[in-house]
Amino acid sequence: MFPFLPHTAPSYIQKGFEKRLRKIIGYTPRDYANYYRAFLHASFANAQEDLYRQHNERLEFLGDVILDAVIADYLFRTFPHMDEGSLTKLKTRFVSRNTLNHLADKIGLPELIVGEFRNGIMPEDVKGNALEALIGAMYLDKGYNFTFKKIIALFDKNINMLALVNSDNDYKSKLIKWGQKNRHNVRFEHTATRIENNDKVYTVTVFINESEEASAEAKNKKTAEQKAAEVVCNKWYV
């Protein structure tokens, strides 16, 4: 059972939270409990005896799945002649960490997030993760069809969707294709894992012909791969 009473804000929630939340999502929740949790980061929750493991990561998991389904659904309907591979690449752009972090910033989610971050600086991925948790709360409160409409409306209003459709920032795929064309062996290797603010941070290194070319860190391996691949693409003019 979730410990918070309906419509009773936990002590850590900032004054005016409900009003700011309603402005962002455009409706009044039936029960704020999951919405409170959506903005509770593990760095704060796990440091409090009464909040231990009551952070937003379960909602983030749910929201990630719902977001994937919504974007896949939207793209499938919008581009009826696009093949599976192209749809997959396009979906990846819509749900990338960069896109979600940017969208979270645009709609003002960071001001609602409760966490204790090193040097008081909120990591970028915390923002996108909170957005996914919010989507999870929205889905539990309002169901799929309502959540679908809200997600697409948020993207349409705050993200240049046409630019996303026309962009090609899959640096890993570009680098692998370049390697195949030019007979270079391109390899991605997970080389380290560390803990930062209770989150895992992964290091991925790119090797070309067994020579180490670049490394990058991120909260998930796919993002680290893309970051490292982007450095190598710029270095080798791919």
Image (cartoon, rainbow, N blue to C red):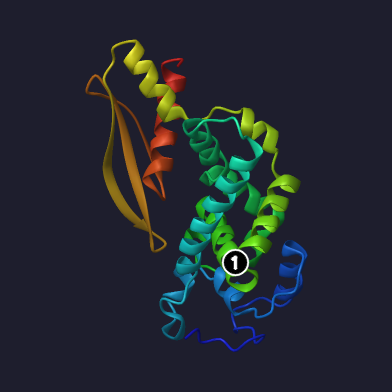
- The quarter of the picture where residue 10 lies is bottom right
Quadrant for the C terminus in the image: top left
Q: Position of residue 200 (x, y in %)?
A: 36, 56
* Residue at position x 41%, y 79% in the image: 52
Above or below residue 11? Residue 152 is above
Q: Position of residue 15 (x, y in %)?
A: 71, 78
Q: Position of residue 101 (x, y in %)?
A: 58, 49
- Whether residue 39 appears in this view of the structure is no
* Residue at position x 63%, y 60% in the image: 110
Left or right: 19, with 82 as reference point? right
| Mark 1 residue element | helix
Left or right: 10, with 211 as reference point? right
- Whether residue 118 appears in this view of the structure is yes
Above or below residue 172? Residue 122 is below
Q: Position of residue 214 (x, y in %)?
A: 35, 29
Which one is nearer the viewer's eye here, 101 or 155?
Answer: 155
Which one is nearer the viewer's eye here, 205 or 61?
Answer: 61
Outermost residue on the top side: it is: 182
Above or below residue 108? Residue 180 is above
* Residue at position x 70%, y 75% in the image: 29
Q: Which residue is denoted by mark 1 in the rendering?
A: 139
The crowding category of the residue bearing disc 1, from other C-alpha atoms within 10 Å (few below 14, some 14 to 19, many at least 20), is: many
